[in-house]
Amino acid sequence: MRSTPSVLSSLIVAGMLVFNSAAAVLAQDGMETRREWGTLANGRAEFEVSDPALVPRTLALAAEQSRCDYKDDMKERPARFIRPDGRRLAIVFCAAIIGSDQVFDVSNVLRPRPVEFPIIVRPDGFGATARPGLITWEKEANVFHAVSGSDTTLAGLRHIYRLDRGTGSFVVVRVEFAPYSGTKDGWTTIWNAPTWSFPEMPN
């Protein structure tokens, strides 16, 4: 009969072997994932992907977990990979009755995560959503436009965002409204972000 210390030692050794083996598998998987992303980027900071088969596995998984149906419309609406202020983002179109872009933070290619945007909520508040509409990045001004609505609606909203360097989050700076009337021009500002002022703290 084996002694208790001997059995415990065997269990500890077995546990260490399993742990080391799992760690090695994870490390290998991480290397393969980084290699996949590196091959796709090919040294580019900004690029597009129109073939669903080329979407990196970790981003594909994040999109599927977000219930983003991205595959069918990728040729018409490629996934866009950009780097505003050094932050790596992927903008992916998600098909639906009214489709919308969704942004994923891919700074950590092993764990892409969906990004939420503040939006106005009728009649008198703000909310947050991961799908604020069709997104364009105005690179020179370093702002993002998100247009919600469709060609069949009578009106649309456009949120203008900037990326806050301190928090890394998107900040809404202006909201515009347009009664389409067959066109998408004539945006009218309905909300502007104020410049915050805080009362002085008492001594």
Image: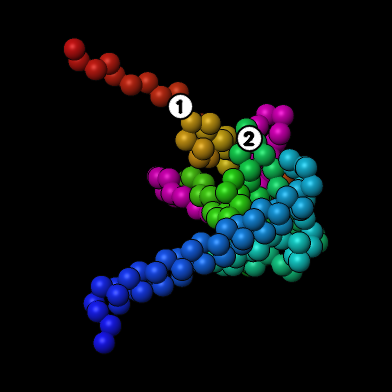
Left or right: residue 173 versus residue 134 is left
Q: Which mark is residue 86?
A: 2
Crowd class of label 2 (few under 14; some 14 to 19; many from 20; radius 10 Å):
few
Left or right: residue 41 versus residue 177 is right
Residue type pointed to by label 1? Pro
The residue that disc 1 covers is 194
Q: What is the quadrant of the C terminus in the image?
A: top left
Q: Residue at x 30, y 77 (%)?
A: 7
Residue 99 image point, x, y percent:
65, 61
In depth, the one of 97 and 203 nearer the eye is 203
Residue segment shown in magenta: 122-146
Residue 116 is at least partly visible in this image: yes
Crowd class of label 1 (few under 14; some 14 to 19; many from 20; radius 10 Å):
few
Residue type pointed to by label 2? Gly
To which quarter of the image does residue 44 belong? top right
| Magenta segment includes 143 | yes
Q: Residue at x 61, y 52 (%)?
A: 109
| Magenta segment includes 170 | no
Q: How is the image coloured?
A: rainbow
Task: Specify which label sits upstream in the sequence, 2 or 1.
Answer: 2
